[in-house]
Image (cartoon, rainbow, N blue to C red):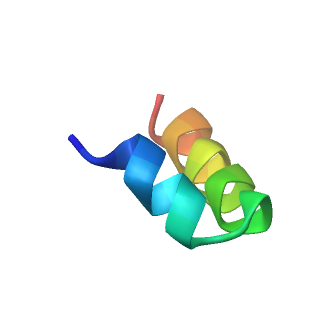
């Protein structure tokens, strides 16, 4: 799991998008 690295490489905005997707999946 390289979520931390992914976040560091990308902006927080992308992280928010992932969280939204996970929320929808949940």
Does 11 appear above or below 2? Answer: below
Percent coordinates x, y for residue 12 in the rendering? 75, 57
Percent coordinates x, y for residue 22 in the rendering? 50, 41
- Tell me the quadrant of the picture where the N terminus can be found: top left
Q: Residue furthest left?
A: 1
Q: Image point 72% across, 68% down: which residue?
A: 11
Q: Image point 39% across, 45% down: which residue?
A: 3
Q: Nearer the viewer, residue 16 or 2?
A: 2
Q: Image point 59% across, 35% down: which residue?
A: 23
Q: Is residue 8 left or right of residue 11?
A: left
Percent coordinates x, y for residue 8 in the rendering? 56, 58
Q: Nearer the viewer, residue 17 or 12?
A: 12
Q: Is residue 14 left or right of residue 3?
A: right
Q: Residue furthest top?
A: 26
Q: Nearer the viewer, residue 8 or 3?
A: 8
Q: Image point 66% across, 67% down: which residue?
A: 14
């Amino acid at each position: 799991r390289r979520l931390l690295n992914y976040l560091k490489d990308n902006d927080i905005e992308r992280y928010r998008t992932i969280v939204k997707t996970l929320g929808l999946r949940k």
